[in-house]
Amino acid sequence: MKVQLKVWRQKNRNSPGKFVIYDSPDLNPNMSFLEMLDVVNESLASKSEEPIAFDHDCREGICGTCSLVIDGKPHGPHKGVATCQTYMRSFKEGDQIVIEPFRAKAFPLIKDLVVDRKAFDRIQQKGGFISVRTGSAPDANSIPVPKDNADLAMDAAQCIGCGACVAACKNASAMLFVSAKVSHLGLLPQGQPERHRRVKAMVDQMDEEGFGACTVTGACEAVCPKSISLDFIARMNRDYLVALAKGDAKKPAAGGA
Amino acid sequence: MKLLLQIWRSSLGKKYVMALTGGALLLFVLGHMAGNLQFFLPPTYINAYGHFLQTTPELLWPARLGLLAMVGLHISAAISLTAANRAARPTRYAGAISSQGATLAARTMIWSGLVVASFIVYHLLHYTLTLPQVNGYQVFTGQSMDFDGLVEPKTGFHDIFAMIVLGFRIPVVAGFYLLSVGLLSIHLGHGVASMFQSLGLRSHVWWPRIATAARVLSVVIFLGYAVIPVSVLLGRGSDYVNDVRTSGKGTHLSPTSLSPSK
């Protein structure tokens, strides 16, 4: 099969970008979207043209490195699937496929389709440590965790931090990402000691990075390759409210060992 | 004080402000609707209700000031959030971007809200300050009309009933009212549910119930408000007002309200 690509090309942050149209070489419909880009890049390189820069790593939907807004939807046409697991058989022979980078102030463009998503790393780092005993492995089930909470925490922990939620949101809001990261530890007993300090620090960093606020449109949930639920945003709102009400911890007068 | 500042500076905090002030305004919208629906009782009821409010400043003014504060906070938080949201995506998508199930109501909250806000200003000038310049009579009938001069003959109370009938007889006025109430209803269809989300009062069990209840409530509010101008346009109260107009002397309409414009 063959398709036509309309790809955003931009040399760097400071030079203007534009769409460029490429006709793909012959493709196998069972290629992934990223493999298709590899093939297109190979043909570009053989013509001594600059290959299209795009992010990718594991190519099995668990690392969150791939991105791309494909025909107006982050991660392409399917629900609950990342770009790397989108296959060319989802498109028709001769389709024109529009590919754009994620766009947000907090995700500055690096080149072509590659954006800098370090803002997410900085938010996660603000989450800080959790107080657990390290050393030898603990006995299994030594800390009881209700099954429902374990399941919910796993749902939240599925977030691969790809940034599709930001890309789809009309406000470029990172609430879905931050709420998943806040909830996955907040639901477990091991996450309780720092629960409120953590939500406060992560939300404040999110604001600092220049992400927008939540209008509850649900677009993030719809494009999330891991189908993270808006319920987690409500959970984060609740935790943050409690954290604000509790205030900052009192500084010890002296010592504290 | 530090807490208030923290709330205002945080994106989540401003959403709490939006939700709480929105909730207070929703209660007012419901109360106001209940008050208005007395229009379907004999005229003495709504006139007595109006008289009660106008002669109870210790109730009226705290409510007015409270509402003003709620509206002020709601609008300023909305504008500040919208500005931050716009700034969060300085470069728009060059290609078409799909809305991903985001409803039109959700995507246009600021616009439905601003139209409703401008309507509120008009509504206050129209029925609270009763400025003759804005009730449309001069423009559309060539006659002047002073709502202030409407007095119920038996009691001497301000005749709210006649004011409503005469006010909504001007189709453009009724039309703007219907448009605004429609937008308010769309605004609340999304806003009431989002209020619970912003305050964290949501779970997978409650969200479908909350979303449905918000939609039902918004339809009820639309019908509860729209029924008044529609019934006036269909003739409700015209006998009452016409009797007054044709019975000549001793009417409860003041002479100025009937005199042709000079």
Image (cartoon, grey):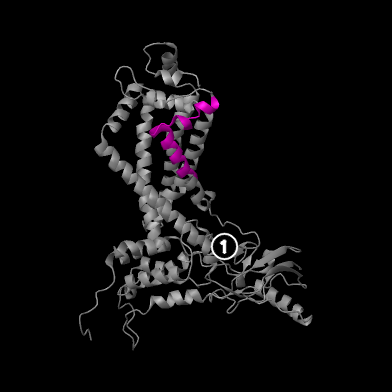
Quarter of the view holding residue A168: bottom right
Up the image or down, B46 lies above or below B219; here it is: above
Q: Is residue B123 magenta?
A: yes
Which quarter of the figure is the N terminus of chain A placed in? bottom right
Q: Which residues are magenta?
A: B115-140
- Predominant secondary structure, magenta span: helix
What chain does badge 1 belong to?
Answer: A
Image point (44%, 68%), residue name: A207
Image point (35%, 43%), residue name: B27
Up the image or down, B138 lies above or below B101; here it is: above
In the image, B2: left or right of B236? left
Q: Foreground: A71 or B179? A: B179
Amino acid under label 1? Lys
Q: Foreground: A68 or B127? A: B127
Could you say whether the residue bearing mark 1 is in a helix, strand or loop?
A: loop
Which quarter of the figure is the C terminus of chain A placed in? bottom left
Residue A64 spot, x, y in % from top left: 54, 74
Residue B245 spot, x, y in % from top left: 44, 15
Residue B101 in sight: yes
What residue would you read off at disc 1? A79
Q: Foreground: B258 or A54? A: B258
Q: Is residue B28 magenta?
A: no
Residue B12 spot, x, y in % from top left: 40, 62
In the image, A101: left or right of A187? right
Residue B141 spot, x, y in % from top left: 53, 23
Residue B237 in sight: no
